[in-house]
Image (cartoon, rainbow, N blue to C red):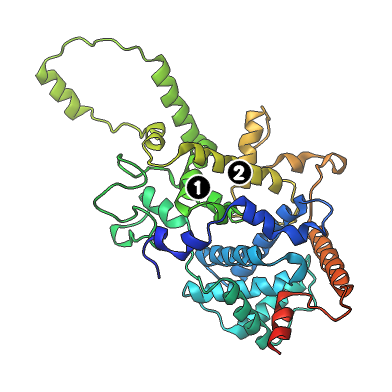
Amino acid sequence: MATDFWASSHYKRWIVDRATLKESRSDDLQYVDDPEYLDFFAIFFANVITKLGKKLNFRQRVIATAIVFFRRFYIKNSYCETDPFIVIAACCYVAGKAEESPVHIKNMVAEARLFFSQQPYGVKYFPSDNSKLAEMEFYLVADLECDLTVFHPYRTLLSICKKESSNDLQTEAGEVGVGVDDGPRYWGSGDGQLELPDDAFQLAWSIINDTYRSDLCLLYPPHLLAITALYLAVVLHGPTRELLQQQSHSVEVTPVHSSPRRSSRQSSSTSLGHAKKPSQDFVAFFAELNISMPLVATIAQEIISLYTLWERYLEDSDLVDSAKSAFHGHAQAQLGASHSGVSTPVENLDDAQRPHGATPTFLLQVLMRMRENRLSDMALASSGRPVAVNKMLERTQAAG
């Protein structure tokens, strides 16, 4: 396992650019009416993996690893040529092994088969044969190039916010500066740690969870996602935001003048009797970071865009570990809404006023049409010979 992020396979092979992501969806784009459906797929499948992971009692880190494996697999494959549900089961199965939380293959097949057969998925064709999942595991690991080390922003968040003991200050698979006693850290020359209330810290944690519903984990290093989550949490968390506004206001209105001379005895007695720890300067903390703040702002805008898209994804039950409601509550407050920020703007609209979006049932229909149309096109190949309809079958035919 790599001990340095910059020397790891994650950084060298699995941080990609948008051109690569666009190319990976080139086949799928031929079979969808609206390219935005593919963005909804990212949210939909991440939610499916999260729910299945909770059924399997996985920790959040294991669920996040499974989502990253799923994203990496579909850099090289298309939705229209594969069965995403068997891929999801394989990703959860491999992630459990990689994160030292293994699940027996029989239990994995039974739980996945039961979960996918329920509404809104209604998948009746999930194989009951354990060997099918084992075969899919082989193809998944091959497409991942055996790179099973995944870096997550959680350890960076814990380290910066003083939420773990010194014994636990180990690198998140070697992220820069974490647990290093000497030398510069990426968070600059300041104290290197931010003091946040527990609920603000939980909000930042939830924002990190939400980033896995997009391709951000493929585009940016994990420590940048952690810092961006902190950046947004300071803004979205009410008490912290008010403290930040007070600090900004005090800087603007406090006049600069010379204070009258005081005796050393009076000064020392005052400092001993009324010493009070000043509140942490959030602006100074972020200003001292040894990273590109314009890049952090760019990532923050992408997270905001994710929440805007997610608001149009209509699902019966939302996940409790999401910061989506906090984001839309803040947006409502900015617009002068009088109701509580827990609800979202879409929830208060009539059906005729709802923005165009997607539901799980609708996305499953889109996926089915994509696969059927792809199968039809490949069956009408000029050679007239039977052709493979997915990567698994293609490799099986090549081997046989």
Asked if 82 appears above or below 14 in the picture, the reply is below
Left or right of 226 on screen, residue 123: right
Please report the residue visible at 51 percent of the width from the left and 40 percent of the height from the top: 295
View extreme (front): residue: 383
Q: Position of residue 314 (x, y in %)?
A: 76, 52
Q: What residue type is labelled 2?
A: Glu
- Comes first in the chain, label 2 or label 1: 1
Residue extending farthest bottom: 400
- Left or right placement of residue 263 versus residue 361 in this view: left
Quarter in which the C terminus is drawn: bottom right
Give the x, y percent position of residue 386.
Answer: 84, 81
Q: Mark 2 points at which residue?
A: 302
Q: What element carries label 2?
A: helix
Label pair 2/1, CB-CB below 8 angstroms: no
Which one is in front, 297 or 157? 297
The residue indicated by pointer 1 is 204
Q: Assess disc 2: are there few (<14), some (14-19) or many (≥20) residues with their C-alpha within 10 Å of its C-alpha.
A: some
Q: Which of the 4 image quarters holds residue 171?
A: bottom left
Residue 109, image quadrant: bottom right
Q: Which amino acid does label 1 sit on?
A: Ala
* Rendered residue at 53%/38% (across/down): 297
**Which disc, if any, is residue 186?**
none
Q: How crowded is mark 1: few (under 14 residues within 10 Å), some or many (20 or more)?
A: many
**Quick check: can you spot residue 333?**
yes
Asked whether 347 or 295 is in front, the reply is 295
Judged from the image, the secondary structure of the residue bearing numbered disc 1 is helix
CA gap, disc 2 and disc 1: 16 Å
**Residue at figure coordinates x 61%, y 43% from the top left:** 302
Residue 262: x and y in percent read: 15, 13
Q: Position of residue 197 (x, y in %)?
A: 43, 43
Image quadrant holding the N terminus, namely bottom left
